[in-house]
Image: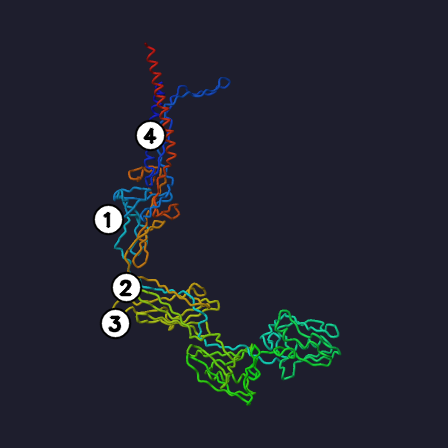
Amino acid sequence: MFKSLYSGVSGMSANMTQLDVIGNNIANSNTVGFKGGRTTFNEMLTQTIRSASRPVSGGLGGTNPQQIGLGTSVGSIDTNFSQGNFQTTGMKTDIAIQGPGFFILSDGTSTTFSRAGVFGLDAENFVVNPTTGLKLQGVMADADGNIGTGPIGDLFIDPSLVVPAAASEEVQLIGNLDADSDARGSILETGSLLVAADASVLLTDLSGESGGSMGLYPGDVVTLNGTSGGANIASSNYEITSTSTLQDLLDWMNTQAPGLTFSMSANPAAPGAIEVTNSTGATVEGLSLFSNGRTNFNQNLIFPGDLADGATATTADVNGARGELRGYADETALLSDIYSTSGSKLGLDLSGGSTNIVVGGDAGGETVTDSIMTVDATTTLADLLAEIQTTFGISSNPVTVDAEGQIVVEGEVGTASSIGRISIAELDTDNSLAPLNFSTTQQARDQQTYNVSTLVYDSLGGEHTVSFEFQKVPGENEWIWEASMDGGEEILEGGTGRMRFDENGAISNFSYDGGASGLQFRPQDQDQEGAAIVTLTVDPGEIGGLSGLTQFEGSGQLMGTADGYTAGSLVDFEIDQSGLIVGRFSNDTMRDLGRIAVAQFNNEAGLVREANNTYALSGNSGDAMVMFAGEGNGVTLTPGALETSNVDLAQEFTRLVVAQRAFQANSRVVTTADTLMQELVNLVR
């Protein structure tokens, strides 16, 4: 009976302890970095009333022991170190730990550990917990910003920290140099000039008396239409090739109808027309040539509707504006025989045997001196070309007639020789010689140069601007470069050089003139003391690659960057995921100031809770293993955030109800045992 009384009391005591743990969890549900606890129970020692007996061979079997438990006791109160959620704060000194690790804190004597990453700077610029003043531990960087592997200590942000100036050592050049940068002259052209076609003209170059090109192409099919005595005269089609001439077409036509003879007209009144003679013995009707979709060809290759036997006619007999075929003029063409694509002649007045034309225009922004040229029936296009060349002082490129009968004038290179206008007209008349009007197809320009400037520094942090100019070698994939100092500093060597590009636009060679290995300049006058001489390596990019300077056709845009910097003071700092504290300086440089250390334990559950969210070592936690986040240990840091409590209120309230009911049940055991004891006492009355 007393056993049940004591068992109930032990159960009440154990569940009261569990209620204490649950109450503490709920109280710290909003505590930064708090880790909830849990309670486990163990059965207390039992009293054996009867021991177990083993079976007897051939006799009785074995019996189980009879035991009465003496209640329960608290087995353990454990800490749940599961990961808590993150809450962003926006404060750069707030840090949350992801993974199994602890911040290391020190009061100067002892060391504690915490998951609560609430930190700030104190009056002496140490990184501390603002609630307790405990200092965050880590490793400070040396004067060059290198993080060592020495013992950890207090992390300190020195506001007076200065980064000394560093002289520039390298200039990187990036961008494209336009491959089309050579100087060039003006190009002016007339429209196509035509002459009466002869049998040697290519069909693909054939033009009509008016309407311009006939537009024939290789693969076009020509049909000879017409009837003689009611029967079609043609038995096949003719397919044009790239080498087909007018004579080839005539030869084919002469095979199609016996008695019909086709040739080029010898009549000076119908130059370039095709002549046909009918010897078939019958009237030929509807004689014409046809090619599908070639309207101008079809309109110019029509013969009179009825061609009697023995009659001769030409394509020019049908319509006065059609039928005379034209080909492109060349230099041997007589000026008096030249036509425009619209069918008009130059209209030169040679009634008196000759006339004069005036050649003039503008060159280099100035009006050229007009030249007077006498033209008669023997004057050729070549004579006019020579006159144009002389008038405009062109010596590098002859004035020519291209394959399409256009006069092409290419002036001297450079804007100083730019040809703005060419005019040719018959003197003392209203004849402007319209077919000889020129249009500009290429503007003159000077040799293109490209420039880029960048800021460099000397050993005292002084700023200097170095500029590079690039000029292409005409006709080659080579460029000449020259450096200059905007402040007039003396360049000692390496101020000029050359570079080449391959056919793919990648740089293939970069060199300095005079065998120099770099660009070297004196930061101040020679008779003054100051910074050391600066030597710069010019980096145009990887040889054979496209990472630096390139040469493609297109706009030339260059950029230059250099290392080095002036002296700078600390203006701010930030913390990254690996715990590096990185300082930002007034010269736009970044430098490591220190690194936050973290600790791990073989048995973190063995740590002893202390006040203010801290833990201390115990005999069962093991020693702290000091390390850094982000080194393969599963620990990362999240700046600007805090880890919230990992307490689950729903779970805690459930445990609270269970503990309450268990406590009530154990109290009933005590009251029941008390009632039975009262009945036992009453037996003696």
At 27% from the left and 71% from the top, the residue drawn is 525
* Disc ID at residue 17: 4
Q: Of tags 3 and 1, which is closer to the observer?
A: 1
Q: Is residue 576 left or right of residue 192?
A: left
* Element assignment for label 1: loop
392 to 461, vertically: above or below: below
Q: Of tags 2 and 4, which is closer to the observer?
A: 4
How many neighbours does mark 1 have within 10 angstroms: few (below 14), some (14-19), or many (20 or more)?
A: few
Give the residue type that dot 1 points to: Ala
- On the image, numbered disc 1 is attached to which residue? 123
- Which comes sooner in the sequence, label 4 or label 3? 4
The Cα atoms of the two marked residues, 3 and 2, are separated by: 17 Å
Do callouts 3 and 2 mark residues in contact (Cβ within 8 Å)? no
* Disc ID at residue 527: 3
- Which comes sooner in the sequence, label 3 or label 2? 2
Residue 674 spot, x, y in % from top left: 34, 18
Q: Of tags 1 and 2, which is closer to the observer?
A: 1
Residue 66 spot, x, y in % from top left: 42, 20
* Disc ID at residue 477: none
Give the residue type that dot 3 points to: Asp
Give the residue type that dot 2 points to: Leu
- Which comes sooner in the sequence, label 1 or label 2? 1
Residue 325 spot, x, y in % from top left: 62, 78
Q: Is residue 458 left or right of residue 251?
A: left
* Element assignment for label 3: loop
How many discs mark residues in the rendered view?
4
Do callouts 4 and 1 mark residues in contact (Cβ within 8 Å)? no
Residue furthest top in the image: 685
The Cα atoms of the two marked residues, 3 and 1, are separated by: 48 Å
Residue 593 spot, x, y in % from top left: 30, 53
419 to 72, vertically: above or below: below
